[in-house]
Amino acid sequence: MSDSEFTVGILAAARPRRDLLAKFGSYAGMFRTLLSEPKLDSKPLKYRTFNVFDDEIPEYSAQCDGYVTTGSQASVLDDLPWIRRMEELVVELHEQRRKMVGICFGHQMIAQALDGRTERCDRGWGVGVHEYRITHRHPFMVPGSVRLRMLCSHQDQVTRVPSGARVFATSEFCPTAGMTLGEHFLSIQGHPEFTADYALELMHIRGESLGAAYQHGMETVHDPTDSKLFAHWMVRFLLD
């Protein structure tokens, strides 16, 4: 780390299966592409990837200036050693007020690690493009918007936010779609890093297991999204 650049630690909670990895790259690579979109007059971003699914956990939270947690095929409800260790890291980051952006699995992890709650949704999968209503405007939300449209791929949802957290994005299907905690945690249920082609491949792979959500996903997967807008919000949040 240095005063002239900002180091983002990408906490990779999964690796795409081999055929998708060859075609679309890693989740860390998807986030590097996403965060290169905002052309802001600010510190350049430098990246360091930690494959937390493979038990590669940062030795100490200050190894990076801020962190981004990716999605995962795993559930935060799974009783896996690396998930428990990741919960400990989230608690440490929270205690030290270090910046973190949680995406999908990362959004749910913040609730799970603190005193919130994540549960399997009884309404089934959320796939395709979903629209969230913005219920609270934060200073980092520039340019502003009253909604966010984003690709999704999840079964679990945050059903209780941690103490002090504030919901800023919601929908009928996913009431806690986005939240902030203090000035250091930002999280969203959707996947701003996904492309439509990648989301489509995932739906083809999961097929009938998606149930009724499959039709919605197929009908909306190529709809416009606000991923570039959220990328601006992420960078402004991290660097503020």
Image: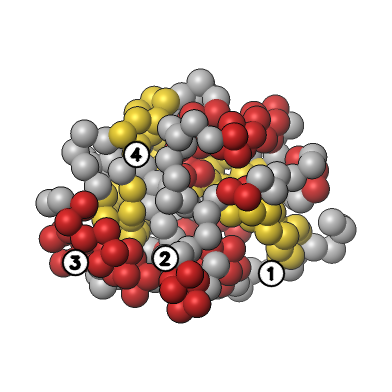
Q: Amino acid at mark 1?
A: Asp
- Nearer the observer, 220 or 6: 220
Residue 115, label in figure? none
Q: Are marks 3 and 4 in contact (CB under 8 Å)?
A: no
Q: Earlier in the sequence, mark 3 or mark 4?
A: 4
Q: Earlier in the sequence, mark 1 or mark 3?
A: 1
Q: How many marks?
A: 4
Q: Quadrant of the N terminus?
A: bottom right
**Can residue 17 be seen at all in this image of the molecule?**
yes
Q: Earlier in the sequence, mark 4 or mark 2?
A: 4
Q: Amino acid at mark 4?
A: Asp
- Nearer the observer, 43 or 57: 57
- The residue labelled by disc 3 is 218
Place of residue 52 in the rendered image (x, y in percent of width and height, measured from the top left): 63, 48
Place of residue 107 in the rendered image (x, y in percent of width and height, measured from the top left): 47, 41
Marks 1/2: CA distance? Answer: 25 Å
Residue 194, label in figure? 2
The residue at the point 31 percent across, 34 percent down is 120
The vertical placement of 29 against 57, above or below, is: below
